[in-house]
């Protein structure tokens, strides 16, 4: 099934698949881990061949609640228990942390927690963001922590949040790389010009000054060349600079 939900808890609004334990008020971590059916631990157990020989280097991550195998992993694999996931989320947010949803996916191979973050406002609209913690017990994925406005209630919504977070990370990486390239560009530009140019705003200012000075220089360019070659130069006014007045007629004598 697409939702992949094994057990879960949710606050008030029923998920689209209709599964899980409903509560009226968002619980704290101690209540949420029980309501979500996540109050079990993962224990590594050795693997054996049919002839009784132990398989070196690998163990089976086994769930204590029903002894089911969640995945085969390296013996160096670091297990993060569900209660540690809740503790991490409590500590990173701080205060009286409350959980909107939490649950087990793929028969315990993956778990998620969705905790409330302080309400914020975007363009005048109230938005309730969440902190989502996702962990895999089968060794197929790393721990993932996201900030998201999406209410995670199944594997589908968890995947949407993951893709959204990856896209944001790529955009941040792109902006960071672009900023590094711009820093180098402005450093080279400053060295070549002998002026401190740190950003687009300063560059625009220098371009405007350069444009005005270029117009002024064009007026005196020939005079400077004449002065260098002959000792003096004459700067003639342009038509725009001339102020022509109404001519006056002067009478001579008594006429």
Image (cartoon, rainbow, N blue to C red):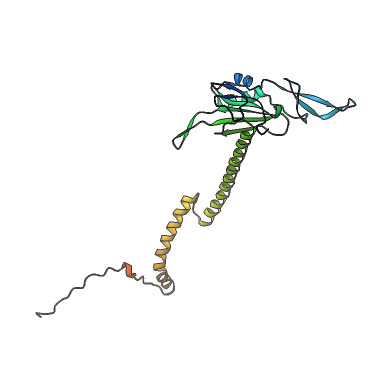
Give the residue drawn at x 41%, y 60%.
212
Residue 215 in which image quadrant = bottom left
Compared to residue 76, the image places residue 239 above or below, namely: below
Q: Which quarter shows the N terminus?
A: top right
Which of the pair 10/162 is nearer the observer?
A: 10
State left or right for residue 228 relative to residue 55: left
Q: Give x and y (percent) for residue 63.
A: 73, 23
* Quadrant in which the C terminus is drawn: bottom left
- Most extreme residue toward the left, as rendered? 254
Point out residue 132 in the picture as x, y percentages from the top left corner. 60, 30
Q: Residue at x 63, y 36 (%)?
A: 159
Q: Nearer the viewer, residue 199 or 129?
A: 129
Q: Nearer the viewer, residue 214 or 24?
A: 24
Q: How many marks?
A: 0
Q: Going by the image, does 88 lie left or right of 212?
A: right
Relative to 145, 41 lies left or right: right
- x, y percent for residue 194: 50, 55
Q: Quadrant of residue 54?
A: top right
Q: Position of residue 252 (x, y in %)?
A: 13, 79
């Amino acid at each position: 099934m697409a939702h992949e939900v094994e057990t879960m808890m949710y606050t008030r609004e029923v998920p689209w698949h209709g599964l899980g334990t409903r509560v009226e008020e968002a619980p704290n971590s101690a209540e949420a881990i029980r309501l979500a059916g996540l109050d079990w631990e993962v224990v590594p157990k050795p693997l054996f061949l049919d002839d009784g020989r132990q398989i070196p280097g690998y163990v089976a991550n086994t769930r204590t609640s029903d002894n089911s195998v969640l995945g085969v992993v390296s013996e160096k694999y670091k297990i993060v228990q569900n209660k540690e996931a809740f503790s991490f989320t409590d500590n990173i947010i701080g205060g009286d942390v409350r959980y909107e949803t939490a649950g087990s996916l793929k028969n315990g191979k993956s778990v998620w927690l969705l905790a409330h973050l302080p309400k914020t406002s975007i363009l005048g609209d109230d938005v309730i963001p969440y902190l989502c913690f996702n962990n895999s017990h089968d060794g197929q994925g790393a721990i993932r922590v996201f900030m998201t406005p999406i209410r995670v209630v199944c594997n589908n919504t968890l995947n949407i949040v993951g893709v959204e977070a990856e896209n944001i990370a790529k955009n941040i990486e792109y902006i960071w790389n672009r900023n590094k390239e711009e820093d180098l560009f402005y450093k080279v530009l400053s060295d070549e010009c002998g002026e401190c140019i740190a950003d687009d705003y300063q560059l625009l200012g220098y371009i405007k000054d350069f444009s005005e000075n270029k117009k002024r220089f064009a007026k005196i360019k020939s005079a400077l060349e004449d002065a260098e070659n002959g000792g003096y130069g004459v700067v003639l006014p342009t038509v725009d600079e001339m102020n022509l007045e109404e001519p006056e007629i002067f009478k001579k004598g008594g006429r």
